[in-house]
Image (cartoon, rainbow, N blue to C red):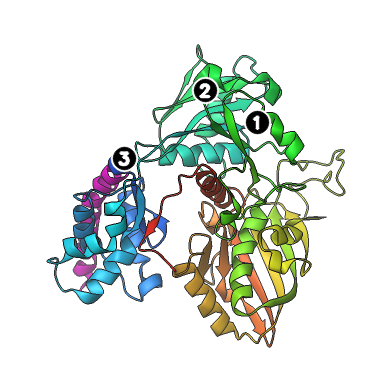
Amino acid sequence: MSPEKYLLDWQTSQTNAESISPLLGQLYRQKGVEVLMFGKQIVNTSVIDIVKSHRLSRRYTGSELSPSQTLPLIQTLATLNLSPCRVDIGQLAHSYWSNNEDEGNISDFLQTALQESLNSTQSVETRDVVLYGFGRIGRLLARLLVEKSGQGYPLRLKAIVVRGGKDGDLEKRASLLRRDSVHGPFNGSITVDENRKAIIVNGNYIQVIYANSPADVDYTAYGIHNALVVDNTGMWRDRKGLSKHLNCNGSEKVLLTAPGKGDLKNVVFGVNESAIQEDDTIISAASCTTNAITPILKAINDKYGIDSGHIETVHSFTNDQNLIDNFHNGERRGRSASLNMVLTSTGAAKAVAKALPELSGKLTGNAIRVPTPNVSMAVANLNLNSVAAKDELNAYLRDMALNSPLSGQIDYTESTEIVSSDIVGSRHAGVVDGAATIAQDKRCVLYIWYDNEFGYSCQVVHCMEQMMGVRYKTYPEVK
């Protein structure tokens, strides 16, 4: 290929991506149809990101998919009377162009592939959401919910509940949402309505409610009804404590963004979300580490069987540690988080059993907090029931990341240059580092990266959708 041809091909792809972008917005905001590219969201992404997502198709199909191949499919999608759903245009385009040489059959192909959605009478029923607490996870959940907001998306962030209320508090809350040292600036507009104590985020009116406890809140006074309250404070982790939210007027269900205690269902989306029943009022979304490792452990257990294992978590420091040495009730956590590796405990290995009972009693775990602000790694040292060679094991995990019901939770990389900062913003629960995999006889060691803030928040949003009965089907269906 001549040097000039590289630039011409890029400019052609960019032009087609510029045509694709408004169609994605039209489908999402008018019809509730979210378009994906091999499992990755491309709605609200830049033109360059759309081009890059096409180039990544090589990982999934062995050949690069171009925007010129997906554009006619997306143009046809926009003419169809689809019910709310998620459409993986990468999978559909690959399937179509593998069997066709021109665009003549696209309409018939899509009508057949999306027949269930075309025949559905499902409509969008909006559901109110309240964030109780506005820390690291709360602000990322706000970003995700605002990013998804539109006529076709049913979850509406209506309020956040925080302590405080002093002069300047509202602007500081808005500023923390607007700027983030790890995840970068917010993509959009944020303004403050001081008179009504509200933050307006990309047109979404979010009421700020100041309260010291759930008992102080009446959501109906703000026009909020039958809401899902997402508690990301960690103050209450059992049914008795979290039931305080249910006693508030206007609340209907509660989701905890931490491991639940007692009889609470701990849900790892992709593994055991079917455990959520319509009459469940309190659910836990488990922990970031439990979400990162459980889908991968399930995949391994399904194929090879896990006899026993140890999970060592190398985890970024969190707000419950001290920046410099100071008193702390927890062992070692009083020592400076920014200067030390801190050996501590984790319940993630045991918590796996709540989502995946077949591994009950088979895993142990520990954690090392390290001086990085975000992105962690789990090292899973597993004793298997059958022999697993490295190449075979990696090929299986790559396939699970690309073509399985767990593809939304598991990502895979074989890059020998990847480091923790490269994982910031990952929407997957965990990313298998295939280059680091060790396998010998019936033993393997897996290295699993995860964005313990953003990746976990994406899992929480999935649980929110499941709890409120607004999780839309993805086409083509992965079995």
Dot 3, how many residues are within 10 Å of its Cα: few (below 14), some (14-19), or many (20+)?
A: some
Q: Residue at x 61, y 68 (%)?
A: 298
Q: Residue at x 18, y 63 (%)?
A: 108
**Magenta stretch mostly in which secondary structure?**
helix
Q: Is residue 1 visible?
A: no
Check residue 29 in the rendering and tell me which mark sits there, or answer none: 3
Write down the residue under mark 1. 246
Q: Is residue 410 left or right of residue 341?
A: left
* Element under disc 1: helix
Q: CA distance from mark 3 to mark 2?
A: 23 Å
Identify the magenta region.
Answer: 1-28
Dot 2, how many residues are within 10 Å of its Cα: few (below 14), some (14-19), or many (20+)?
A: many
Q: Amino acid at mark 3?
A: Arg
Question: Which mark is first along the chain, 2 or 3?
Answer: 3
Q: Is residue 367 left or right of residue 15?
A: right
Q: Amino acid at mark 2?
A: Gln
Q: CA distance from mark 1 to mark 3?
A: 32 Å
x and y percentages locating residue 353 in the rendered image: 72, 62
Nearer-the-camera pick, 114 or 24? 114
The nearer-to-camera label among 1 and 2 is: 1
x and y percentages locating residue 2 in the rendered image: 20, 73
Check residue 207 in the rendering and tell me which mark sits there, or answer none: 2
Q: Is residue 321 left or right of residue 468?
A: right
Q: CA distance from mark 1 to mark 2?
A: 19 Å
x and y percentages locating residue 196 in the rendered image: 50, 14
| Vertical comparison of 442 with 34: above or below | below
| Vertical comparison of 404 with 336: above or below | below
Q: Is residue 196 visible?
A: yes
* Dots 1, 2 in contact, CB < 8 A: no
Question: Which mark is first along the chain, 2 or 1?
Answer: 2
Task: Report the residue that reaches farthest toward the top.
Answer: 195
